[in-house]
Image (cartoon, rainbow, N blue to C red):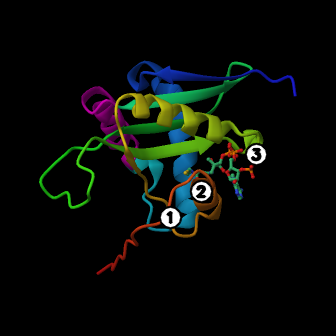
């Protein structure tokens, strides 16, 4: 394949429209899997504010994959705030990966694997030894991806809506 795939770190504030457009698509996908997901128009402003803030204050990294210069996917993670509630044997810095997406037409090319490997490399260099991420229980492709990349399921989140 002759496509040129590049993975680049971006500052979300400076690439707002590009990242927001992909975040929107990710959100549509989340909505298709969980009907209590709020409409993107309702939360876009606050959610984008949140990722910009965590990028600035929690060593956040947003990587965008460009295929022939076209933004085709991204991943975003940041260092989770440390507090006294930790109970695991490891007390060092933790990476929380909150968002990741590859556009439908570019899936199956190994793009997300590249994004994820680069994110892990950056934080391993910073000394991080634990990475956490949530995924919806019915998101089979994300779960398969994570399990193939060495992640294991350690907890289940139960919800009751009243
Ligand atoms: C999950 C997602 C990011 C994968 O992106 P991608 O670029 O197509 O993934 P890759 O091509 O890098 O795949 C890497 C591995 O993930 C797994 N995988 C990816 N898509 C899969 C699918 N639809 N079904 C099963 N396994 C899948 C495979 O193990 C694959 O390895 P292989 O090619 O050796 O079989 C993409 O499908 C997506 O954006 N989904 C909607 C948003 C989402 O679920 N985000 C959460 C990400 S954790």
Task: Answer with left or right where residue 2 lies relative to residue 88.
Answer: right
Q: Is residue 160 above or below residue 125?
A: below
Residue 55 position, x and y percent, is: 33, 30
For residue 20, above or below residue 39: above
Q: Give the range drawn in magenta.
A: 43-59
The residue drawn where x is 52% and y is 69% is 137
The Cα atoms of the two marked residues, 1 and 3, are separated by 20 Å
Residue 26 is labelled as: none
Q: Does label 2 point to a residue whose CB lies under 8 Å from ligand 1?
A: yes
Image marks 1 and 3: residues in contact by CB distance under 8 Å: no
Label 2 crowd bin: few (<14), some (14–19), many (20+), radius 10 Å: some
Is residue 49 highlighted in magenta?
yes
Predominant SS along the magenta part: helix
Query: Label 3: which residue?
Result: 108
**Quadrant of the rendered structure where residue 92 is?**
top left
Q: Where is residue 102 in the image (x, y as percent from the top left)?
A: 64, 41
Position of the C terminus by quadrant: bottom left
- Mark 1 vs 2: CB contact within 8 A: yes
- Mark 1 or mark 2: name the one nearer the start of the chain: 1
Which residue corresponds to mark 2? 142
User: Is disc 1 placed on a helix, strand or loop?
Assistant: loop
Q: Which residue is drawn at 24% across and 30% down?
A: 57
Determine which residue is flagged by label 1.
Answer: 136
Viewport quadrant of the N terminus: top right
């Amino acid at each position: 394949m002759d496509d040129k795939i590049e993975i680049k770190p971006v500052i979300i504030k400076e690439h707002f429209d590009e990242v927001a457009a992909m975040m929107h698509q990710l959100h549509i996908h989340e909505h298709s899997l969980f009907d209590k997901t709020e409409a993107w128009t309702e939360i876009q402003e606050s959610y984008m504010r949140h990722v910009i803030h965590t990028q600035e204050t929690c060593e956040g990294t947003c990587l965008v994959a460009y295929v022939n210069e076209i933004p085709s996917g991204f991943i975003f993670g940041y260092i989770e705030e440390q507090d006294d509630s930790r109970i695991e044997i490891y007390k060092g810095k933790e990476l929380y990966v909150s968002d990741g997406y590859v556009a439908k037409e570019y899936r199956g090319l190994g793009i997300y694997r590249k994004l994820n490997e680069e994110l892990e490399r950056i934080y391993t260099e910073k000394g991080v030894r634990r990475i956490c991420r949530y995924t919806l229980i019915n998101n089979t492709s994300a779960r398969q991806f994570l399990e193939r990349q060495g992640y294991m399921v350690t907890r289940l989140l139960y919800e009751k809506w009243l």
